[in-house]
Image (tube, rainbow, N blue to C red):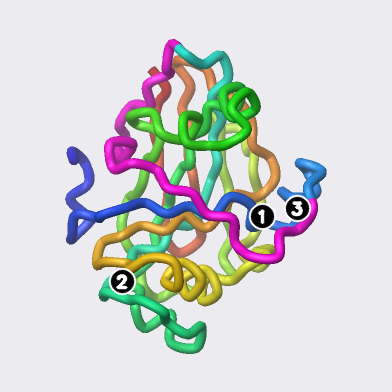
C-alpha cells in the first residue's frame, strides 16, 4: 500500500454506496432508491495520491466518480443513526473508478468496479467537517466536471453507517464510499484526474 501511509489501519473492506445524490439519479434517469444500494470493492483496488490508474485492456470506457469517503475508527455492528458518527475516524477523498462499458454489459458492478488501481483515496483523513454539507468537485486535466455538495445526499452519512452496520461488522480502518454526484465521464490514458472536497483537499491521480 504505497502512498497510503495516512491510513492508520489496514482496512478489511471497502463498502460503496451506488446511488446517493438526487442530481446523479436524475442524470441516469433512475428512481430514488428507498435504501442505500451497496457493493464492495477489493482492497487490491486501493492506491494513494499521485499514483497511476491503470486502464484495463478489457474496457473501452473508464470513468471517474468523485466521492466522500468515511474511515471507520471503531468496530461497530447494528449501530443506531444517532450514534453512528461516534464510530468515525474521519473523512477523505475517493475516486470510485468504473469501467462503464463493462458495468452495462454485466448488469451488476463487481467486474466494472474491481480492477487493480480502481480505488484512489487520500490525501489525508480529516475529522472536523460536516460530512453532510461540503463542496465536492472533480477536475479532468484542470477542467471542472463535477460540482456539487454533499447536502444533495439521498442518504446522510449517519444513515449509511447504520444501514451497512446492520448487514456486516465494520472494523477500524474500513472505508465507506458515499456515492458520486452528476457529471461523471470518461478518462483517457495520459489524463490527470482530481477529486477535491472542501475541508479535506485534493486527490490527484494519473491514467496510464
Circle 3 SS class: helix
**Which residue in the structure is indicated by mark 2?**
89
Helix, strand or loop for disc 2: strand
Q: Nearer the viewer, residue 147 or 13?
A: 13
Disc 2 from disc 3: Cα separation:
28 Å
Q: Which of marks 3 and 1 is in front?
A: 3
Q: In which quarter of the image is the N terminus?
A: top left
The residue tagged 3 is 23
* 153 sits left or right of 70 in the view: right
Residue 79: say if magenta: no
Residues marked 2 and 1 touching at CB (< 8 Å): no
Q: Which residue lies furthest to the top in this view?
A: 57
Residue at 74 percent across and 50 percent down: it is 25
Q: Distance between the residues labelled 2 and 1?
A: 24 Å
| Residue 200 pos. (x, y %) | 41, 60
Disc 2 crowd rating (10 Å Cα; few below 14, some 14-19, many 20+) is some
* Closer to the eye: label 2 or 1: 2
In the picture, measured across the screen, residue 12 lies left or right of residue 20, that is: left
Of residues 22 and 32, which is closer to you in this image? 32
What percent of the width, then of the height, locates residue 22? 74, 58
- Up-down relation of residue 44 to residue 182 (above or below): above
> Of label 2 and label 1, which has the lower sequence position?
2
| Relative side of 77 to 66, left or right | left
Q: Specify the segment rendered in magenta.
A: 31-57
Label 1 sits on residue: 148
Is the residue marked by circle 1 packed among few (<14), some (14-19), or many (20+) residues within 10 Å?
A: many
Residue drawn at x 54%, y 34% is 64
How far across and how far down the image is residue 51, in percent?
30, 31
Q: Are marks 3 and 1 in contact (CB under 8 Å)?
A: yes
Examine the rendered structure and indicate whether residue 154 appears above or below residue 6: below
Amino acid at each position: 500500500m504505497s502512498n497510503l501511509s495516512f491510513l492508520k489501519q489496514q482496512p478489511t473492506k471497502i463498502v460503496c454506496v451506488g446511488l446517493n445524490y438526487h442530481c446523479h439519479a436524475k442524470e441516469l434517469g433512475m428512481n430514488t432508491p428507498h435504501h442505500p444500494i451497496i457493493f464492495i470493492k477489493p482492497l487490491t483496488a486501493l492506491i494513494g495520491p499521485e499514483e497511476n490508474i491503470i486502464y484495463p485492456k478489457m474496457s473501452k470506457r473508464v470513468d471517474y466518480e468523485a466521492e466522500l469517503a468515511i474511515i471507520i475508527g471503531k468496530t461497530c455492528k447494528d449501530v443506531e443513526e444517532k450514534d453512528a458518527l461516534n464510530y468515525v475516524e474521519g473523512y477523505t477523498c475517493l475516486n470510485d473508478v468504473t469501467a462503464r462499458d463493462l458495468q452495462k454489459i454485466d448488469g451488476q458492478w463487481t467486474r466494472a468496479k474491481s480492477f487493480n488501481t480502481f480505488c484512489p483515496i487520500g490525501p489525508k483523513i480529516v475529522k472536523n467537517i460536516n460530512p453532510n454539507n461540503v463542496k465536492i468537485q472533480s477536475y479532468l486535466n484542470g477542467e471542472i466536471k463535477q460540482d456539487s455538495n454533499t447536502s444533495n445526499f439521498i442518504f446522510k452519512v449517519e444513515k449509511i453507517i447504520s444501514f451497512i452496520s446492520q448487514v456486516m461488522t465494520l472494523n477500524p480502518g474500513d472505508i465507506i464510499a458515499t456515492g458520486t454526484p452528476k457529471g461523471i465521464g470518461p478518462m483517457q490514458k495520459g489524463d490527470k484526474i482530481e477529486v477535491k472536497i472542501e475541508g479535506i483537499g485534493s486527490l490527484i491521480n494519473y491514467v496510464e
